[in-house]
Every structure is written in C-alpha cells, then in structure tokens.
Image (cartoon, helix red, strand yellow):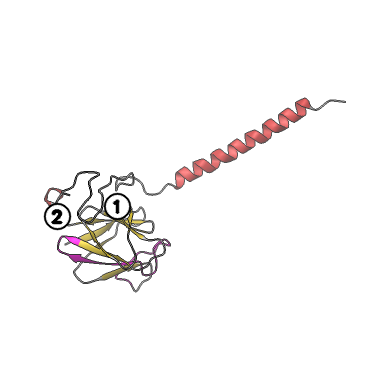
Amino acid sequence: MPKLVVLTVGFNDRSLEVKPEKASIGRVDDNQFCIAEPSVSSHHCEVWSKGDEIVVKDLGSTNGSFINEKALEADKEVALRPGQVLRLGQIELRYETGKKQTEQPRPSVKLGEAAAGGQTLVMSKNSAFTKKNNNLNKVFLGVGIVLVLVIIVFLVIAFTSVSAPHE
C-alpha cells in the first residue's frame, strides 16, 4: 500500500496510507491526516493514489507544496513518484510503496535529464538522513555576533582611554 512517511524531526513517527479516495492533509482536525505545525495550512493539500503514483493537489496553501523542491501550482494535480519528497510548508514526507527497496521501481531518467512531466531529478542537500532542525546553528551564530560586539566595545574603550590626554 503506498504511503507518505513524515521525515521532519518531531513528526517522523507518522505516516499516511494513501488510497484511491482523496484524503486531505492540513493543520486542523477535520483533515484525514492532521499535521499540527504552523507552516502547514489548515487545509493544505489533497492526495490520492493512482496506479504507482500518488496524485497531489495543493489547495492554495500559504507556504506552498513542493515535490523535490519544485513548487506546485495551486489547484493543479501533480504526480508524486516512489522515493520523491513532498514538502508542505516545513514538513517533508517521502512516498514509499511498502515494497522492499530492491522491488521499488527505479527512475528511468539520469540526474539532470528532464523527466516525462518536464521535471528534473535533482539531488538535494536535505536528504532523509540529515537532521532537519538547524536551531543549533542559529544559536552559535547569535553567540558569535554577541562576542564580536563585546570585543569591539572593549577595544574602543581601551583605545580611547590610551589616547586621551592625562591631566
């Protein structure tokens, strides 16, 4: 059974089995798959299975829907293929078929070549194996900026006290 597996840290224990009937994904409880995260719209998108593909339709979401970082147009149906990543706001989900890795169909295009839908297969830095939370980097940057400012203030005070004439 095809499913969307959430990759984003803090939500990665969740998945949605996708059926031929449309299922809505969004932030509020009346969706078939609720993702309570601020970057996900209340009714973000709809998904359903069609053969070996999952069809995705963005419902005019605020922060957009993306397949392998390519933005989807609102109200347009787009195919998601096995292994591709669907991003809703800041939440990433990967399409898995439920088959063993060796049984899953492989893409027939080489990297950089255009696929049948006009899409290009692109390798992303944000793979499923990297940590999706970069708050630690922001903390280090903030501490570094504060330290630089403190050093500048001390240097200004030191040079002004040395260069001031003593009476």
- The crowd level at tag 1 (other Cα within 10 Å; few <14, some 14-19, many 20+) is many
Mark 2: secondary structure: loop
The answer to which image quadrant residue 91 occupies is: bottom left
Relative to 27, residue 134 above or below: above
Magenta residues, dominant SS class: loop
* SS class, disc 1: loop
Give me the residue at 72% from left, 28% from top: 159
Taking the spot 28% from the left edge, 44% from the top edge, the residue there is 123
Q: Is residue 23 left or right of residue 64?
A: left
- Circle 1 is placed at which residue position? 68
Q: Is residue 34 above or below residue 6?
A: below
Q: Nearer the viewer, residue 148 or 14?
A: 148
Q: Which residue is mark 2?
A: 99
Q: CA distance from mark 1 to mark 2?
A: 21 Å
What residue lies at 37% left-to-right and 49% top-to-bottom? Answer: 132
Q: Percent from the top left, x then y, of residue 115?
A: 21, 51
